[in-house]
Image (cartoon, helix red, strand yellow):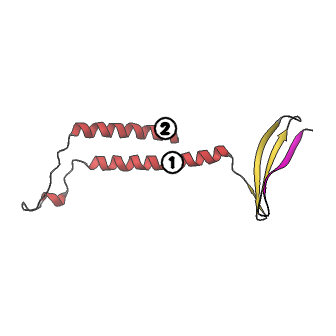
Amino acid sequence: MTGIEYMLSEVMEPHLFVIHKQKRDSPEKVTPMLSYYLLDGSIYQAPLLCNVFAARIGRALFYIQKAFTTAASKLEKIGYVDAENEGAAPDSKVTKVTIDFKEVKQVDHILASLQCKVNLISE
């Protein structure tokens, strides 16, 4: 027997049935094609595993890229003085932070290279 066949795979009566569509090339060789599930009388095609992975990886890359963009924008602001703090009274306690611009440039370079790699992967 060869051709396309549908096989009932899993049964959880009365609500869930899983059906596999497969191509039978010989009595021993079977190639799976699609899976369907019947849930409470409605038939749904199950997504392919590669599509599920692609969607999840794409979502993860989106959030990673968003995090790098946010971090890069915050790093660009380091070292700038706010206009409000310039005219502050001398009595107010303003803590000054010394910034090593060499370290800032190194971190900025690392983030930029990682952002380029994420952009290449997401394309």
| 30 horizontally vs 81: left or right | right
Is disc 1 surrounded by few (<14), some (14 to 19) or many (20+) residues within 10 Å? few
Is disc 2 surrounded by few (<14), some (14 to 19) or many (20+) residues within 10 Å? few
Does the magenta segment cover residue 61?
no
The residue most toward the right is: 1
Disc marking residue 28: none
Horizontal and vertical percent for residue 36?
Answer: 76, 53
Per the image, label 1 sits on a secondary structure element best described as helix
Q: Is residue 39 above or below residue 103?
A: below
Kindly report which numbered mark, 1 or 2, lies closer to the viewer in this rendering: 1
Q: Earlier in the sequence, mark 1 or mark 2?
A: 1
Residue type highlighted by circle 2: Leu
| 24 horizontally vs 99: left or right | right
Q: Which residue is mark 1?
A: 60
Residue name at image x 84 percent, y 48 percent: 7
The residue most toward the front is: 12
Q: Is residue 23 above or below residue 81?
A: above
Residue type highlighted by circle 1: Ala
Horizontal and vertical percent for residue 34?
Answer: 76, 47
Q: Which residue is mark 2?
A: 120
**Which stretch did the figure color magenta?**
2-16
Cα separation between marks 1 and 2: 14 Å
Horizontal and vertical percent for residue 84?
Answer: 17, 61
Q: Evaluate if marks 1 and 2 touch, with contact meaning CB atoms under 8 Å apart.
A: no
Does the magenta segment cover residue 14?
yes
Quarter of the figure that contains the N terminus: top right
- Overall secondary structure of the magenta section: strand
Horizontal and vertical percent for residue 107?
Answer: 31, 39
Per the image, label 2 sits on a secondary structure element best described as helix
| 69 horizontally vs 7: left or right | left
To which quarter of the image does residue 105 belong? top left
Residue name at image x 79 percent, y 48 percent: 20
